[in-house]
Image (tube, rainbow, N blue to C red):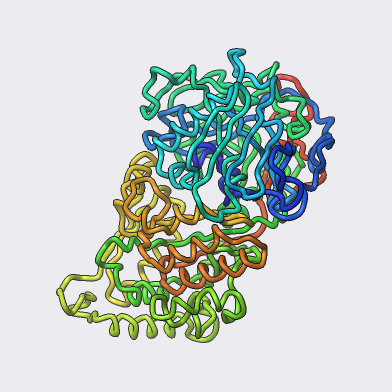
Amino acid sequence: MRRMAAGLLIGLIAAAVAGPAGAQTQQGMAQQGMARHGMALYGEPKYGPDFRHFDYVNPDAPKGGKVTLQAIGSFDTLNPFTLRGVPAAGAALIYDTLMTGSADEPFTEYGLLAESVEMPEDRSSITFNLRSGARWHDGKPVTADDVVFSFTILTESHPFYRSYYGAVDKVEAEGERRVRFTFKPGDNRELPMIVGQLPVLPKHYWEGKEFQATTLEPPLGSGPYRIASFDPGRGITYERVADYWGRDLPVNVGRNNFGSMAYEYYRDASVALQAFRGGLYDFRQENVAKTWATGYDFDAVRNGKVVKEEIANEVPAGMQGFVFNTRRPVFANPKVRQAIAYAFDFEWTNQTLFYGAYKRTESYFENSPLQSSGLPQGRELAILEPLRGKIPAEVFEKTYHPPSTEGQNGLRRNLLEAKRLLDEAGTDVRNGVRVDVATGKPLDFEILLDSPTFERVTLPFIENLKRLGIRAGIRTVDTTQYENRTRDFDFDMVVHIWPQSLSPGNEQTGYWGSAFADRPGSQNMAGVRSEAVDHLIGGIVRANSQEDLKAAVSALDRVLLWNHYVVPHWYSGVYRVAYWSRLKRPDTVPPYSLSFDAWWLSDASSAGPGKTP
């Protein structure tokens, strides 16, 4: 399970550092009726019921000032919970959830809207007791009816939520501030925490409105910020709610420090960088290695007005790569997909374009203890053994490594191997074009991008494919068109990233489950349809110990890798950040998140971005 930002992809920082999650404590909550302040997957939460604040925040951080951030593209809706439209950056800031996670524990959550939780020994349900002081921004109380309404409207409106909460049988209000979730039969240890992540929406606001329509009417929330102003498609500003009901809760102490947060939109990353250099906004998390190496040589960095630093993290990197849409006949044969991967020269790309900043991704759970390694044995082998004949034989025989061009004539060696695989797959080169021998159709495809930045990576890949007789092209489109096309799986190949956490679970069904292969808006971008994969996902959901989880996740990892659904890319293991020096951060950065919400401004004046009073 991953920490879920409302609206799926709202907030690039949150998306890139998908945080920890978990399920229930093994001790303490076993008895029905025993209320608890938090939940941990194994053992007890780090922070006891009387904790005052998280260790990685500054409880004395000053409040106030305006921080300005950047976003790319545009937006046309303020409702982040539906398939329609592109939501405004930061839209999650106005909402609270039942529980909230800490960024220095892998599998723990503490009460936010919920003051306490109760769970019977058989884990068949969980009950949340809402805080009496929880209020919407209009002053009305947050009630159990709001929770029931939120669950219903979210699962009806978006396939992600329908999948994520699919194991919930029913939700019942047992009073004004008490709500019970009853689970379907099965052994899913994540369900309590999954439900705890539910964003709660106001029933009285949304009744009579078309929830699934795009809207530019600022919604009502209960969170630490509200929408102050916006210019459709160009910018949006959130203001800190002075009388926010939860400002003094231990989970919020030292957080939500900015008096206001503004997102300014730019048409592309290059323009945004120039705006930062000019002092038009305060903070950048840099994801382009070349830009990091060459784009920050300006006076403000040299004289210390802009801080440039790399902050190490222990965040699972997940999988980023060129994704094959296996719904398309051109990618139906896994040998074709495997061959195409040999045409991507990561080593050249990393040294020439990225200044050696990255490591090659070799797992869907990269940079975590859950990734597969060596050959399967023990519990993992026991999971995989019944699937022999239904999964690639290499799962049992080889350790997966993506093709490498290291060594003499590395690319030529790889292209020769690709040719061999393509020949075995029933293709041949005729008049310089590789075709399917049986149908005579050329092996050509289009790579869909949403930013010109990735063209410099993709063009050399295309040139290598030409040497195999494969014709590939690039189409770069605007954000809205890209969202629409990927939502409907209207592409041959895209660049995509599946974030992971240290507690994978139900979200894997949305990533790889057969039921979501043709469901618009799902994250099954590759179109995976495999009974074996479905079975392995079930094993992850049912895992009841850390050892079982590790075995189940590693088994799934191997099967996904050897089916060649992606051409793996790279990861770094650090946050690359640059910010104007009036922005300050705690001395301690937690291992699983950048926790930008714990930063603050050194003054509470009206000084704008890039200006130091």
Q: Nearer the viewer, residue 221 or 114?
A: 114
**Image location (x, y in percent) of residue 568:** 48, 66
Q: Is residue 501 above or below residue 203?
A: below
Quadrant of image for the C terminus: top right
Q: How many marks?
A: 0
**Image location (x, y in percent) of residue 403:** 48, 77
Quarter of the rendering containing residue 95 = top right
Q: Nearer the viewer, residue 109 or 219?
A: 109
Quarter of the rendering containing residue 574 = bottom right
Q: Is residue 296 above or below residue 527?
A: above
Horizontal side of 596 relative to 456 (left or right) equals right
Q: Residue at x 58, y 74 (%)?
A: 380
**Image location (x, y in percent) of residue 312:** 72, 56
Q: Residue at x 15, y 74 (%)?
A: 439
Q: Residue at x 61, y 45 (%)?
A: 192
Residue 356 visible (yes or no): no
Q: Residue at x 61, y 48 (%)?
A: 123
**Image location (x, y in percent) of residue 132:** 69, 21
Q: Nearer the viewer, residue 571 or 272?
A: 571
Residue 500 visible (yes or no): yes
Horizontal side of 469 relative to 160 (left or right) equals left
